[in-house]
Structure formats: C-alpha cells, structure tokens
C-alpha cells in the first residue's frame, strides 16, 4: 500500500548522476517525483520513473530545457495541473566541460550561463510563484559547487562564475520568499564521481589522474558519490530544515573549508 505523499517534488537534470540520486532518495522519503531533463535523456527518464513507481510513489517525466523560460513555466504549470501543487523544486540541471579562459568564446560562455544560472533562476521564479499561490510554504534548492566558493583550475571560467552566481541568487531568493515560509538553499558539491567527470578531463589529465588529484584535495582521501549529495538534499527538503535558508551547504569531503 502506498503511504501518504509528503508532497510533489521536481528534480531537474534527473537523467543521471546527482539528479537521479536525488530523485530516488526523495521518493524513498515519501515524495511523489517529477523528473526533468532534455530530450536526449528521455529514455533514461522513463527508466527512473519506473524505478520510482516501483517504490510505491507517483512519478512522471517532463522533457524541458531549463534555459528556456516558456519550457520551465510550462513544466511547472503541467506539474500543478497533474498533481495539484508543487512542494519542492530541485534546480539541479547544469553543464560543465573543461575550457581554459584563453579558449572560452562568448557563445560558450553564454551557453553555460544560460543553463546553469538562468535555468536555476527560472526554476526559482516559477516554483516560488506557485508556492506563494498555495500559501503554505515550500522548499527550493539549487546546485552550486565547491568552485562556486573558491575558483578551481579544473573547470572553465563560465562554470565557476555560474556557480558563484547561484549562491547569490539563492540568498536573494531566500530574502524574498522567506515571508512566505519558503526556504531557499543550495548544495555545493566537491569532487563527485559522476558521468560529468569525463567532461573535465584533458589529454594531460586523464580520468585516473583526475581522480587522484581530486582524492588529494580531501583530507578523507576520497571522492564523493551522488548519494552523498542526495543525503543533504533529503534533509534540506524535509520539514526538519525549516530554520535553514539562504545557505549554500558544502558537501566536499573537506576539499574546501567554509
């Protein structure tokens, strides 16, 4: 028998890695889950929906590009039309890739900022508007990074700037939405072993060498896994986190101390 739902959660960029882990964890926590990603991840999303339903929770997939306002607005509207409300927004979608400053074009810069920063803004905006309309609070959660707290040499400058921007956006949204009992926080992962890692490897730093470098960044001598991020999101999305807002919480194995 399916237990009573704790609410409706959207997880963007849920087709793999951290997003997938978050979606499955929130399903375990009792939320009904809408998974989002781009069209190329449609098959993966369908599989995740099946996994969530097997846990006894309602689930559906919504293909949308978070950098496009009409698609984010439409996604939120469709979720509300289907489930009646929205309680948790996880703005996880993002793109990376190793590009040194000298090779960064304006077009590449704009694409990273469009997905990572504008996409997060749009998710915050439309989720917040719906939660305000409902009148009983909510949880909005974004994805910053260890390099959003201290610029890192392994990432391109647009990625670093986008993750710093998400911290500021999170603080601004927390101020605006606080009177409506909506908390806004972000998670700031360190080195996490996901499919994104190959995007930041180079001929000089192949995957194995990159993993070794990342392990050396942590006093624990290891890298994280997607479940490490899903664990903190589980708490931030819960009622137990009601007095936490405006924070970008580091989950980095000590690779950077706040």
Image (spheres, helix red, strand yellow):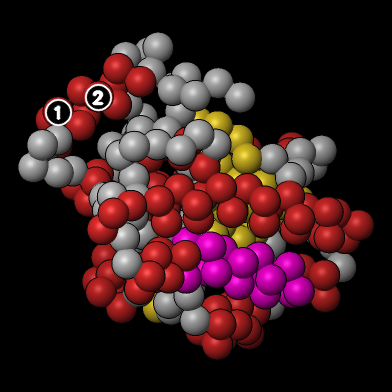
Is 64 colored magenta in this rendering?
no
Q: Nearer the viewer, residue 5 or 63?
A: 63
Tag 1 residue: 209
- The span shown in magenta is 114-130
Image location (x, y in percent) of residue 81? 63, 85
One can see residue 31 in this view: no
Tag 2 residue: 213
Q: Is residue 88 left or right of residue 250?
A: right
- Magenta segment, principal secondary structure? helix
The label shown at residue 5 is: none
- Distance, label 1 to label 2, CA atoms, is 6 Å
Q: Is residue 198 left or right of residue 251?
A: left
Asked if disc 1 and disc 2 are in contact, CB closer than 8 Å, the reply is: yes
Report crowding for label 2: few under 14, some 14 to 19, many 20 or more residues within 10 A (C-alpha): some
Image location (x, y in percent) of residue 116? 47, 61
Q: Residue at x 91, y 57 (%)?
A: 179
Report crowding for label 1: few under 14, some 14 to 19, many 20 or more residues within 10 A (C-alpha): few
Quadrant of the image containing the C terminus: top right
One can see residue 244 in this view: yes
Image location (x, y in percent) of residue 100? 28, 50
């Amino acid at each position: 028998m399916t237990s009573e739902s704790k609410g409706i959660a959207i997880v963007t960029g849920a087709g793999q890695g951290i997003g997938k882990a978050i979606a499955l964890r929130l399903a375990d926590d009792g939320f009904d889950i809408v998974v989002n990603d781009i069209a190329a991840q449609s098959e993966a999303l369908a599989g995740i929906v099946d996994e969530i339903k097997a846990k006894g929770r309602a689930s559906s997939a919504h293909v949308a590009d978070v950098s496009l306002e009409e698609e984010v607005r439409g996604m939120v509207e469709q979720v509300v039309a289907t489930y009646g409300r929205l309680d948790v927004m996880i703005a996880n979608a993002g793109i990376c890739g190793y590009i040194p400053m000298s090779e960064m074009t304006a077009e590449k810069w704009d694409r990273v900022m469009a997905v990572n920063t504008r996409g997060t803004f749009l998710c915050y905006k439309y989720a917040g508007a719906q939660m305000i309309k409902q009148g009983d609070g909510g949880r909005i959660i974004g994805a910053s990074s260890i390099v959003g707290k201290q610029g890192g040499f392994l990432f391109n400058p647009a990625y670093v700037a986008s993750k710093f921007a998400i911290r500021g956006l999170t603080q601004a949204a927390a101020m605006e939405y606080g009177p409506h009992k909506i908390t806004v926080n972000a998670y700031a992962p360190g080195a996490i072993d996901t499919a994104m890692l190959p995007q930041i490897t180079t001929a000089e730093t192949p995957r194995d060498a990159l993993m070794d470098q990342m392990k050396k960044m942590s006093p624990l001598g290891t890298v994280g896994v997607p479940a490490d991020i899903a664990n903190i999101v589980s708490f931030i999305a819960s009622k137990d986190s009601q007095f936490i807002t405006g924070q970008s919480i580091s989950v980095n194995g000590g690779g950077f101390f706040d």
